[in-house]
Image (tube, grey):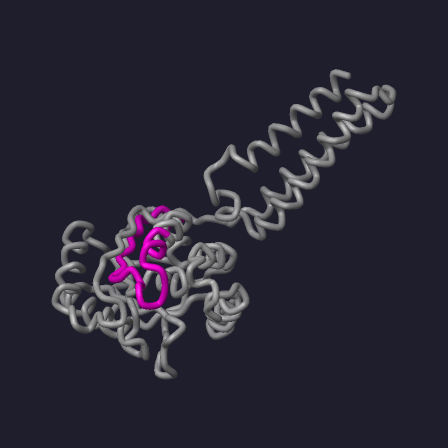
Amino acid sequence: MLLSLAGVLLSVIVLGYIAVGSRPGQHTRLVRGAKLLRNAIIVTYAVLLGLNLWCVLADPGELLEDVVALLTLVATGAWGLVVTKRRIPIAVRARRRKILAVGAHPDDLELACGGTLAKLVDAGHEVRGLVMSSGEVGGNSSTRPEEARQGASFLGLSDMRVLNFPDTRLETVGNDMVAAIESAMTEFAPDVIFTHSAHDQHQDHYAVHQATLRAARAHHSILCFESPSVTRDFDPSVFVDIDGYVDVKVEAVLTHRNQAGKPYMTPQRVRAMAAFRGAQAKNSNAEAFEPVRLLGSAIGDL
C-alpha cells in the first residue's frame, strides 16, 4: 500500500510539473523533439497513475503492487535519462556580447534568424529585438505585437519593442525609423546588428535595411538575414550552425498564430530552409547571412 501511494504521489508530481509547474515553453525550448517527448511522458505517467490508484483501491496483492511500483521507478529513471540525453548542448562564451535584431514586421525575426538568436541567448549573450510595424495590413494589429513579444520571450530575448510605423509604407518614414534605430543603439550599444537584406523584394524589408545602414553608418558589424521574400541575388557568406535549434525556431514561428495560413510559416518550410542552408554550409542545419561588414571579434564563435 505504501509503495502504491508513493507511486501515486510521484506520478502526480511529474504530471503537475509538466502541466503547470514550469515556465511556459521551457520544455520545448531546451530539449530536442520536446513536444513528442512531453506527450509520451504524459501518457506514461497517466497510465502509471491509474495503475497505482488501482493498487491502492483494489488491493490486488503485494506482488502486483511491487511490480507497478517498480515500473514507476524505472519509467522515472528512463525518462530522466532520455530528457538529459536530448538536451540541446550549450557552449557558454567567455565574453558576453550584445545583439540587436531589427525587423519590419512581427514575425520577421523568428522566420529569418530565430535559431541564431536562441543560440546566442543560450551562449550567454544579450539579444534585443526592434520591429518597425504592427503588421496591420498583413494581419490583426491588435494581436500581432503580442505574438512578437511571445516569440521573443520564447527565444530568450531580453527585450522586444514593436513600433507603430505604417505597414507596407515604411519607405515613407525612413527618417523616423533611422531615429528609432539610433535611439535603440544609443541605449543598448550592440556589438552586432542583424537586419533585412538589400536583396529583398518586400518594400518594407528593403526600407528597414536602408534605415538600419543609415543609423549604423559608423557601426562595425552588420549582418543581413534571409527573409522568405529575398531575391535570387541574396548571396550569403556567413552561416550559423543551428543544429539542435530547428525545433526551437519552429516553435517560435508557430507563436504567430495570426499568420498561420501563410505557406512560409509552416514547420515543413522552416525545416527545409534550415536543411538547405545547412547543406550549403556543409552541415546539417544552418541560417544564412550577408555581411555588410563584420568585425570578427564582435561576434565571436557561433
Is 127 one of the magenta-colored residues? yes
Considering depth in this image, is 258 or 120 the residue closer to the camera? 258
Residue at (36% x, 81% y) in the render: 231
**5 relative to 160, above or below:** above
* Residue occupying the far top of the picture: 2
Q: Which x, y percent locates residue 133?
A: 26, 62
Is residue 43 magenta-colored? no
Locate residue 259 relative to residue 33 in the image: left or right.
left
- Is residue 262 visible in the rendered image? The answer is yes
Give the residue furthest to the bottom.
232
**Region of the chain picked out in magenta, as a range:** 121-146
| Left or right of residue 152: residue 80 | right
**Residue 57 placement: quadrant:** top right
Q: Is residue 25 above or below residue 208?
A: above
Task: Tally the marks.
Answer: 0
Tell me where residue 45 appears, x and y as whole percent. 68, 35
Q: Left or right: where does residue 18 sit relative to residue 255?
A: right
Q: Residue at x 79, y 29 (%)?
A: 68
Q: Quadrant of residue 181?
A: bottom left
Residue at 77% of width from left, 20% of height from top?
56
Residue 134 at x, y percent in the picture: 29, 60
**Residue 252's x, y, as percent?**
44, 55
Residue at left 42%, top 59%? 258
**Closer to the camera in the image, 180 or 276:** 180
* Quadrant (top left/top right/bottom left/bottom right) for the N terminus: top right
